[in-house]
Amino acid sequence: MTAELTDSDLPGLFRDADRASVRGQRLTVLLNAVRLYGAGAAALGGALSWKLGFFDVWGGVALVGFAVALAAEVMLVIHQPERDWYSGRALAESAKTLGWRYAVAAEPFAEDVPAKEARRFLRERLAEIAEKGKDRVTLSSDEADVTPRMAELRESPFAERKAAYLKGRVQDQKDWYVRNAEKNKRRALGWRVLLIVGEVLAVALASGRAFGVWDLDISGVLAAAVAGSAAWFGLKQHTALASAYSVTAAELSLTRSKIVDTDEAEWAAAVADVEGAISREHTLWLASRSSAAH
């Protein structure tokens, strides 16, 4: 039976960093959503008025909205979950590519490198990348470097290593990029339509007030809603991600067709080319996220 390698068989550093990144992403998205909804509620409360005795209900809504938005902002500043998200993802992807390179005997862990030396080299490389994110990622998993499945795959015949890599790494990664490229394209279109509808509605309501059709002024609320939606759209980066994922998926498709015909003598370098293509996308993603955060 062909040896296979899944994410659970990769070095413990990958699993720890991946968990930290997922937690950071979820908290970043949650707090930003809370902040935007709070600001929207404050804008709505500021535009309307409904008094019960001395208390203005909508004024209270505005107060709560501002308080919620402020609390979310403070949480983002204190905990900086986006740093866990970005650092964790950078560490996880670096550990993943090293794990695969080792398991299929690719550069710099080619088959002619003695097992003891290859393992030492892997441990050193993992320690180097762990050092860069140790303040954001807690390393708690066992099997920090070579797992039993990685060792088993490395000792397998070339044909099995090749099949495992094509299926578990190249095809799996390509499918992920294709799937997420389409998802981000759909979401980008949906958000653009929503923004256009909101802006058209704002123009219509502002025109009605300007020409005396009605006195109610909620154009400020709509402006806040459109601005909030635009900020959310910027945070999610659907358009940029769709483009980047499509390019990488196409690159992996071409690379896969080449690696299918790769013989054992060219194998170590061919895998390095594939991993380089994947690493470029992650580097660009991290750069875009870091610049957006600042």
Image (spheres, rainbow, N blue to C red):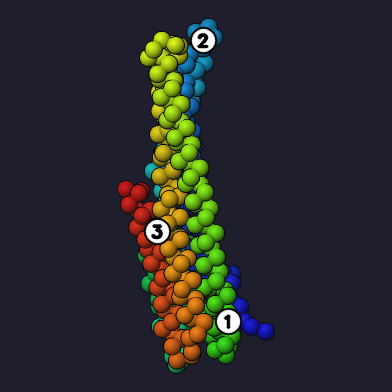
Residue 269: quadrant of the picture: bottom left
x and y percentages locating residue 106 in the rendered image: 45, 83
Amino acid carrying mark 1 in the image? Ala
Q: Can residue 239 be seen in this snapshot? A: yes
253 up-or-down from 108: above or below: above
Gap between marks 3 and 2 measured at Cα: 50 Å
Residue 121: quadrant of the picture: bottom left
Q: Residue at x 52, y 16 (%)?
A: 57
Q: Residues within 10 Å of mark 3 (few under 14, many from 20)?
A: some
Q: Residue at x 52, y 82 (%)?
A: 260
Q: Say left or right for 210 vs 144.
A: left
Q: Which residue is mark 2?
A: 51
Query: Which of pointers 3 and 1 lies earlier in the amino acid sequence?
Result: 1
Q: Residue at x 36, y 48 (%)?
A: 293
State which mark lies toward you, 3 or 1: 1
Q: Residue at x 57, y 90 (%)?
A: 157
- Asked which secondary structure carries label 1, the reply is helix
179 up-or-down from 126: above or below: above
Which residue, as the protein is rendered here, is positioned at the far top? 53
- Asked which secondary structure carries label 2, the reply is strand
x and y percentages locating residue 200 in the rendered image: 44, 28
Query: Which of pointers 2 and 1 lies earlier in the amino acid sequence?
Result: 2
Gap between marks 3 and 1 measured at Cα: 29 Å
Residue 230: quadrant of the picture: top left
Q: Which residue is mark 1?
A: 163
76 up-or-down from 5: above or below: above
Amino acid carrying mark 3 in the image? Trp
Q: Residues within 10 Å of mark 2 (few under 14, many from 20)?
A: few
x and y percentages locating residue 201 in the rendered image: 46, 26
Query: Which of pointers 3 and 2 lies earlier in the amino acid sequence?
Result: 2
Q: Which residue is mark 3?
A: 285
Pick whichever, 162 or 75, lies toward us: 162
